[in-house]
Amino acid sequence: MEKQLFLGDEAIAQAAIDAGISGVYAYPGTPSTEITEYIQGSAVAKERGIHSRWSANEKTAMEAALGMSYAGKRSLCCMKHVGLNVAADCFMNAGMSGINGGMIIITADDPSMHSSQNEQDNRVYGNFAMIPMLEPSSQQEAYDMVYEGFELSEKLGYPILMRITTRMAHSRAGVVTRPIKDENTMNCPPDGRQRFILLPALARKRFKVLLESQKVFTESSENSTYNKYFDAPDKELGIITTGIAFNYLSENYPDGFEHPVLKISQYPLPRKLVEKIANECKEILVLEEGYPVVEEQLKGFLGKGVIVHGRLDGTLQRDGELTPDTVGKALGKEINSYYAIPEVVEQRPPALCQGCGHRDVYEALNEVLAEYKDPKVFGDIGCYTLGALSPFRAIDSCIDMGASITMAKGASDAGVFPAVSVIGDSTFTHSGMTGLLDCVNENTNITIVISDNETTAMTGGQDSAGTGRLEAICAGIGVDPAHIRVMIPLKKNYEEMKTIIREEIEYKGVSVLIPRRECIQTLTRKKKASKK
């Protein structure tokens, strides 16, 4: 047993290796990316042949992880919180079929939206699918939960959703590791056809099994070492806290808790422990990062006689992250701020890198579109989303992965001209290809710009599934090869780029423009590496 300094993401990755996984399946997304990257860089993982290639999107990752589990081996599936929306179809039904080899699904939530479109709390998804959940309060607990979680998954027969947040993922602490386990041998389930074919007649039976399993899940939660009750003398108030919020509470009580505290890190809610603190204390304060998930459940099964404070009654803010100070204020403590930000410090918004090919694309696109009365440009998720900011102000929407093509299609169907989509190479193969097929099937009057920097740049330069294949993919989907135009976005090609953009906007049908230049960041790293 060794003690190592790990990010929360790294602790999860090391635990998965030590627990005997055979594969990790993921699409890069902050703050989850480092889990898969750590496994990709692990000598032990390479030696064991642990699968660690990036998937095209979160749905394919979830399905592949479930397939590995079906074969009896342990699999890890990782994504940021909004990725679970993409994987939700398989996720929900994996709760119906159950698993064979242990399967843990990591959702890295992003309260305060540091790098996300929303701050959804995926404990809601766990409750929706009615499967067990884990929520660590420390890097050590994250390691232990994953190390033990695969065995728990196999014991219960269901996938486990493990929820972390940005602060857990990207902060460091010492972690004691454990001996590495052997991988499972391949062993497909003998009752696989009864469980994994969700035809209505079989699915109805599986749903009854899932409902019956709730008692077992709750018993496991009530007996979990991760759910702890800390008694204290002042029972005017009882505090229920979850995951990383436990740390913010602890910082306000360096000499020990004054009120009884129930720390919850395994779900479903440990009903007996919840009833214990509710019966012993006059009022309850719920401290949880994200949505008022526990708070709402308490009000549901404790009845109206218990006074519950938290995000719903304004004791804590509804949005953003908790901090030790916000928790202290909720406890009625006087908070002194010693590190106020000076007025001279200005907020600095992010910007596209100097030398980035997206800059040249937006400059040329803006100049051409200025020739039209009311053009609309539908953007997508990637570093090129920064084209919405000054000095470009080049896009009119950014909703979710792949939405640029389909929103532009809908706008074109409504009569908007020009209707332009700007999407990145990785996002295109993630969830843009089906939208392009819709456009081809209806010969939509649309211009699609696949801005190809040959990597997944926004999350650090991971491999892009479409590198070297974009033209073939578009042609295979049915785009006329004469209207698949490749450009090199450089100043010397500026006039040529404008001409091509103008020609394809005027073409009455589906056009795909592919401005291609390697990401300046990955190119710089390659040059530095070549000099060593």
Image (spheres, grey):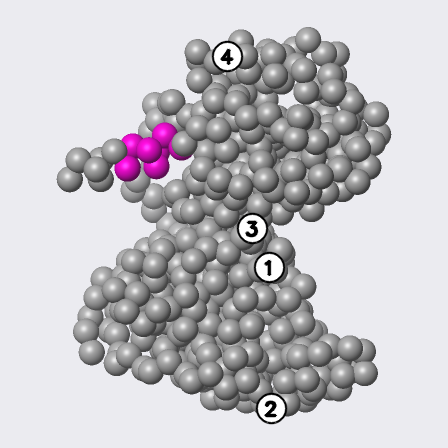
- Badge 4 or badge 2: first in the primary sequence: 2
Q: Which mark is residue 59?
A: 1
Q: CA distance from mark 2 to mark 1?
A: 26 Å
Decide which of 136, 7 is in the foreground and name it: 7
Residue 402 inside the magenta-drawn segment: no
Q: Give amino acid for label 2.
A: Pro
Residue assigned mark 2: 190
What is the crowding at mark 4: few (fewer than 14 residues within 10 Å), some, or many (at least 20)?
Answer: some
Q: Give amino acid for label 4.
A: Tyr
Label 2: which secondary element: loop
135 sits left or right of 336 in the view: right
Q: Which mark is residue 119?
A: 3
> Which residues are drawn in magenta?
519-526
Decide which of 9, 166 is in the foreground and name it: 9
Label 1: which secondary element: helix
Q: Are marks 4 and 2 in contact (CB under 8 Å)?
A: no
Decide which of 328, 420 is in the foreground and name it: 420
Residue at the image position 32 percent from the left and 75 percent from the top: 18
Residue assigned mark 4: 494
Residue at the image position 57 percent from the left and 32 percent from the top: 450
- Badge 1 or badge 4: first in the primary sequence: 1
Q: CA distance from mark 4 to mark 3?
A: 39 Å
Mark nearer the viewer, 1 or 3: 1
